Amino acid sequence: MADDMESSDLDLTRQETESAMPMSTDDVSTPEPKLLTTGTHVTSSLHQGHTPAHEITPALSFEDLTSLQDGTWPDDTDAMKDTPPPRSPTKTLLPVVLVASKYPEDIAAGLLEIARSCVHRNFVTEDNMADYGNVEQIAVQFCNDLNMADRSVIVRPSHKNHTQVPEGETFTITVTYKRKCEAFRALGRMLGTLFDLTNVEDLAMYLSWEEHAQFETFGVMFDCSRCAVLSMDAVLYFLRTCALLGMNTFQLYTEDTFTVPGEPFFGYLRGAYTSDDITFIDNYAYNFGIEVFPCIQTLGHLGQILQWPRFAGVRDTTEVILSGAEETYELLTRVIEAASKPLRSKRIHIGMDEAHGVGEGRYKQIFGDKDSAEVFLEHLKRLEGICRERGLMPMVWSDMLFTLGTDVQLTPQELIAAKNSSLQSYYETSELPKEMRHNMPAGLDLVYWDYYHTNVDAYSRKIQQHRDLGFEPWVAGGIWSWNRFYSALPFSLAASDACLKACKRSKVKNVFVTTWGDDGNECDILSALPGILYWSEHCYTAEPDVDWHMVRKNFAGVCGGNLDDWIYASRIDVPLDAMDKTRFPPNVSKWILWNDPFYNFLLPQYRDLNLDRIYSEIATRLRSVSSGDMLTMYPLNRRLKFPYLLADTLRHKSLLRTHLVAAYKSADPARALYAFAHGPLATLRTALDTLWRYHRDHVWLATYKPFGMEVLEMRYGALRTRLESLQERVLAFCQRGGEGEGGSGDGGMTPRGPPMGMQQRQQPQPGEGPVMREETLPELDVELREVYQGIGLEIVVDFARAYTPSRALGTG
């Protein structure tokens, strides 16, 4: 199979073994430190900005999560010139297929869908039996028992050894369940068990267990509003995967990416889901016992629609809709109806988080100066009434309830944070403003969201604060997929571990995990799969810690990937062993890639580090595990070609300016720069083009609708253009240096010469403006300064900040 990555990445087929190395996620009892600010990407005691901060507490070690199964990599990895031999699987799958021989009608359609797409083709139903030749067939029957304990599933073999069955009897695995989701969870775990088995005679022993879900509902939310909207095929893929993990709720976060009758600018050119799409998704999910409910916005985060003149009348600020206006509630009524009518569920998540500046824009001009908490509460009551009249059960993110108050006893610094609706005050404030404490609508659920803490007590405190205020909270964690190319798995797992330990201790009833796509949705969302699977394993054990061996084998058996390889790929953003993996996850690969090649003004953050060598090591391993024989056992590993190509590009780009300046200031700059332009710089351009095309064809277009891809391609296009300009200007400098003083004669350049059109002319032709004459390269004369002093690589930078020192992007 070599490097063939051309087949659909959502149509998966085979895998490999994993080591059973234990991973500890013990509780930490150290005091909670202040959060770090990453909005402007500098540390501070006060958070300002949309990318919140995280505390510094011990968590999972990166070495635990990324230990190699085949030893350490050699120091000399300049060997990327030759393809390293692919790492071979250490086992083959046993020739066993599970056959659903008996099952209730209500799960028949779901079982058939799993059989059609099962990654290792080792599960079928009797309705779609094929000729399996010598493959052993194991009968599985599913029995629905409404009298068994809630949230339980029991898997039992009929005999102790399937090879020693009395004549006239049939060896059968029986799955007894109460809810559909547990039936599919049992099937997913059986697929993981089959992947892990090395001796077919152990089959009966290992296909026997009981499980009990720790929560009434648990599921996942996918962001479909930040440029990338999941394709229908991708949605169905995730539904099947979530079913095999035992999840029973599913949300697509859609600010405007669904259609609203009479509102053509709702989701305009954004790939919006139609009502028929949502109904199809709901019916498909229902086959697996998964409840789909809307996740929308009804106050803030509405800048996408508020930009259009059609909605000027309901605009408070550029991001916040106008509270108090009847036109607003007429529109939001239709939005709520459009989002909820295609679905069975009566739940609806109406958002209302991070509505910074509510009541501070046009609202103040129209209705006068009112306290933001009062404005928020009035709006919340109107929306709760709209939902109640339609039999809907609304829920809202709870951050604004805690951050709008001014009557809470805070320090002056905390008070400033509260007035700015910062997350600092959300996580530290324990009381609601008095207006809200006594006037909150009754028919409402609050969702406490926290993606940042790695200390169990932080979650426990906030859960209790919600209860003290009279609410039984839903709790939402996060897999760090935002503002990066690949999910930050080590930190995500550490934060998820602390969150779910607290939820189990506090007997929370409802949890879900989120993924977000802030700043262009550049991330391959499939990289969140290990984190999503980790949540499912936590949700099905009463123990404080998960069984990491089970996590590995279920990721292999259900998803088709090698867990260690997938976690290792996160190293593109944490390239140094010495980096603090328990802090907020930096996005190093993103800001090094987009950093303008002329300036490379973030180079001082890592000037003395051999990142070219380190990224070469990372690329070497990722190339090995994403191709060749590995894909026969781990077909999902083909998706790791994306971080491989990214690492390969970064090994050429990370020290680009260092080498350019060295050549520019050498004794013979024309000769040195000419060699660099036709060597490393040309190689970088080729690597970038390969990365761009793979990102476009095999990540974005394989997973999302095409709408929104222009944002990603504008970024690649800008970088490609700047690299082309850099190469041409360097060659123009070389030509000038070869002719005049300071040059070196022809410098050996005359056989090839500069590109067509680059020959220098002393005077412009008639009618022309100035002619390019590169006597110096001024950008390379500037001495770079360290922007974020003392932080090194541990920063989070968005595209606008990473690309250029100028503020022109988005600010005019």
Image: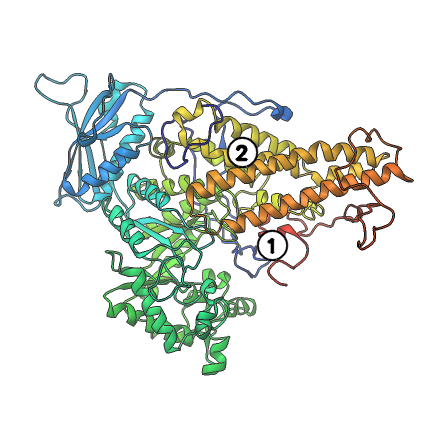
Q: Residues within 10 Å of mark 2 (few under 14, many from 20)?
A: many
**Residue 49 locus on image (x, y percent):** 55, 60
Residue 60 seen in render: no
Of 700 and 85, nearer the camera is 700
Q: Residue at 72% x, 43% y: name it.
A: 726
In space, the residues marked 2 and 1 are separated at their CA atoms by 25 Å
**Amino acid identity at mark 1:** Ala
Q: Is residue 284 visible?
A: yes
What is the basis of the colouring in this image? rainbow
| Residue type at numbered disc 2 | Tyr
Considering the numbered disc 2 on the image, is that residue within a helix, a strand or a loop?
Answer: helix
> For mark 1, what is the residue?
800
In the rendered image, residue 746, in percent from the top left (x then y), is placed at 86, 32
Report whether 628 appears left or right of 439: right
Residue to which mark 2 is pinned: 644
Give the position of the C terminus as an image quadrant: bottom right
User: Is residue 505 or residue 91 the one in the foreground?
Assistant: 91
